[in-house]
Image: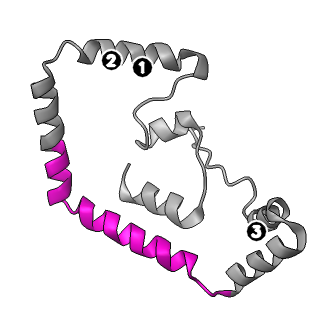
C-alpha cells in the first residue's frame, strides 16, 4: 500500500472492504469466508515444496530490506504516537470520557463516530 492510502486510512480512520483492501495493496487477496480455509491450505501446500532453509533465507532478505528502508524507525514512531494519543488531554478526548461515564461505552462510541458517517471508503471503477 502506498503512502497516500496509508495516510488516508491513518488520518481518517476510514475502513475498507476486503476486496478494496486487496485493490489498494493493504492485503494480498480477499476471498469469501467459506473459501478462506481452502485458499490457505493451497498456499501452504505450495510453500511446502520449497526447502525450509530457502523460505527462511528469502523471508530474511525481505525483512532486512524493510529494516534498511526504516521500518523499525516507523514502528517505534507508531508506538510513541499511540502512547501520545492515549495521554491526550484535548477537548474531544475529554468529551469522550465524559460520555463514557454518562451513557456508557457503546453510546459514547456512537456519539464519537457519528460525524464520520459509516467510515467506509468506496473505490470507484475508472470510467464509471
Is there CB contact under 8 Å for labels 1 and 2? yes
The stretch of residues the image draws in magenta is 62-90
Q: Position of residue 121 (x, y in %)?
A: 61, 49
Magenta-colored stretch includes residue 17: no
Number of dots carrying numbers:
3
Name the residue at 18% across, 57% down.
Answer: 67
Q: Position of residue 96 (x, y in %)?
A: 75, 75
Q: Which residue is mark 3?
A: 112
- The residue sitting at the front extreme is 101
The answer to whether residue 88 of the structure is visible from this angle is: yes
Name the residue at 57% across, 43% down.
Answer: 123
Q: Position of residue 40 (x, y in %)?
A: 42, 20
Cα separation between marks 1 and 3: 37 Å
Q: Which residue is mark 2?
A: 44
Is there CB contact under 8 Å for labels 1 and 3? no
Name the residue at 22% across, 63% down.
Answer: 70
Q: Quadrant of residue 68?
A: bottom left
Amino acid at each position: 500500500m502506498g503512502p497516500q492510502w496509508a495516510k488516508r486510512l491513518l488520518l481518517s480512520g476510514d475502513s475498507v472492504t476486503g476486496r478494496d483492501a486487496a485493490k489498494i495493496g493493504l492485503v494480498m487477496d480477499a476471498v469469501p469466508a467459506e473459501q478462506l480455509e481452502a485458499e490457505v491450505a493451497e498456499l501452504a501446500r505450495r510453500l511446502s515444496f520449497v526447502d525450509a532453509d530457502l523460505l527462511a533465507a528469502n523471508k530474511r532478505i525481505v525483512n532486512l530490506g524493510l529494516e534498511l528502508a526504516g521500518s523499525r524507525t516507523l514502528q517505534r514512531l507508531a508506538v510513541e504516537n499511540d502512547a501520545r494519543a492515549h495521554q491526550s488531554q484535548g477537548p474531544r478526548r475529554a468529551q469522550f470520557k465524559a460520555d463514557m461515564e454518562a451513557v456508557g461505552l457503546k453510546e459514547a462510541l456512537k456519539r464519537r463516530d457519528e460525524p464520520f458517517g459509516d467510515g467506509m471508503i468506496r473505490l470507484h471503477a475508472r470510467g464509471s
